[in-house]
Amino acid sequence: MKYSFHPSAKMELSEAAHYYETFRTGLGAEFAKEVYSTVRRITEFPEAWTPVPGCPTLAKAMSE
């Protein structure tokens, strides 16, 4: 399964990582790593996640 981020979502992820980085060096990278790890799990096991109501191509996941 392939995935892509909407350009606005990519920018929001980058801004969020920069924001977290202001609190502790490396925290922004940890945040981004968790986002990509969750996306990887969704793409590896697409049936394991709850679909977003009204948008069957989106799923929501809770990170471990």
Image (cartoon, grey):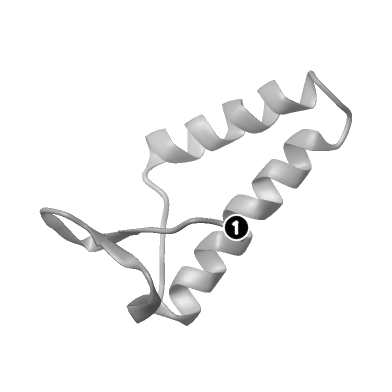
Residue lying at 76% horizontally and 45% vertically, measured from the top left? 30
x and y percent of residue 14 in the render? 60, 33
The picture quadrant where one finds residue 29 is top right
x and y percent of residue 10 in the render? 49, 40
Residue that badge 1 annotates: 36
Instruction: Specify the farthest residue to the left.
Output: 54
x and y percent of residue 21 in the render? 78, 26
Give the amino acid at mark 1: Tyr
Left-right relation of 55 to 3:
left
x and y percent of residue 39 in the render? 51, 62
Residue lying at 45% horizontally and 74% vertically, measured from the top left? 43
Q: In which quarter of the image is the N terminus?
A: bottom left
The answer to whether residue 27 is above or below residue 59 is above
Left-right relation of 18 to 57:
right
Q: Quadrant of the C terminus?
A: bottom right
Q: Element at badge 1?
A: helix
Left-right relation of 46 to 16:
left
The local crowd at label 1, few if under 14, some if 14 to 19, many if 20 or more residues have their Cα within 10 Å, is few
The answer to whether residue 58 is above or below residue 10 is below
The answer to whether residue 51 is above or below residue 8 is below
Left-right relation of 45 to 56:
right
Instruction: Specify the farthest residue to the right.
Output: 25
The picture quadrant where one finds residue 15 is top right
The answer to whether residue 32 is above or below residue 45 is above
The picture quadrant where one finds residue 8 is top left
Residue lying at 74% horizontally and 35% vertically, measured from the top left? 28
**Labels in figure, total:** 1
